[in-house]
Amino acid sequence: MQTSEGTKRREKIKEKLREAGKPVSGSELARRFHVSRQVIVQDIALLRAADEPVLATPRGYLIRAGEEPRVRRFKVRHTFDQMEEELNIFVDAGATVRNVLIQHPVYGLLEGKLNLSSRRGVRQFMARIAAHPDAPLMNMADGIHYHTVEAPSIEVLDEIRDALEAAGFLVET
């Protein structure tokens, strides 16, 4: 099986980010790989969708060498109108919201992939939800749902927990 140019480029992007040890801008990656910045943004999205630990920072992208991201699942409940506020708690702390899960009485665990890591991503998601207000999985579970969240440290996950609790969104398990 032949490897595509995109696949090769994404492997090289991972390599570059691991070696850099500091954030690398999307523009710098675009210049290095002779593609547009938008192609880099798409490559980063594909890497994240494949669960690569790529972090987005205000100065660029990075993968911390030898350090795996921290993951935690939060059980939450809120209204439809509070959804954007809840998602922004995660991304403002520098985390990525990987998914939303509900426990359905008939189908068991249902999952929707999100991969949200910025306010821009949250706004785009909210625009899609606004067009389909019956779509949120939480509607099928009395508002109770879970998010799998990836963050650069346990401390960030603890900060998120505290912020969710302060907002009244956290559900005790």
Image: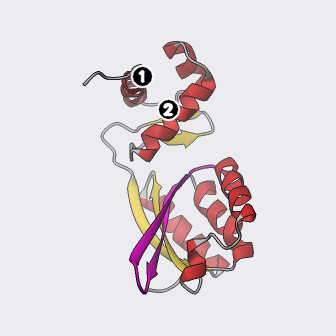
Quarter residue 40 falls in: top right
Cβ atoms at labels 2 and 1 below 8 Å apart: yes
Above or below 79: residue 85: above
Q: CA distance from mark 2 to mark 1?
A: 8 Å
Q: Is residue 160 visible?
A: yes
Residue under the image location 57 percent in, 33 percent down: 41
Residue 38 in the image, given as x and y percentages of width and height? 62, 28
Q: Residues within 10 Å of mark 1 (few under 14, many from 20)?
A: some
Q: Position of residue 27 (x, y in %)?
A: 61, 22
Check disc 2 and report the residue beneath it: 43
Percent of width and height locating residue 23: 52, 31
**Which residue occupies 69% across, 57% down?**
128
Label 1 sits on residue: 9
Name the secondary structure under disc 1: helix
Label located before the other in sequence (2 or 1):
1
Which quarter of the rendered picture does the N terminus lie within?
top left
Amino acid bearing label 1: Arg
Considering the whole magenta stretch, tell me its main secondary structure.
strand
Viewer-closest of 149 and 111: 111
Instruction: Depth check: give the residue in front, 103 or 24.
Output: 103
Q: Name which quarter of the figure residue 21 lies in.
A: top left
Residue 52 is tagged as none
Q: Is residue 117 left or right of residue 132?
A: left
**Which is more toward the observer, 83 or 170?**
83
- Looking at the rendering, the stretch of residues picked out in magenta corresponds to 96-118
Q: Position of residue 19 (x, y in %)?
A: 37, 25
Which amino acid type is shown beneath numbered disc 2? Asp
Determine whether 47 is above or below 38 in the image: below
Residue 155 belongs to magenta span? no
Identify which residue is drawn at 56% across, 14% down.
31
Placement of 133 over or under 125, stated as above or below = below
Magenta run includes residue 115: yes
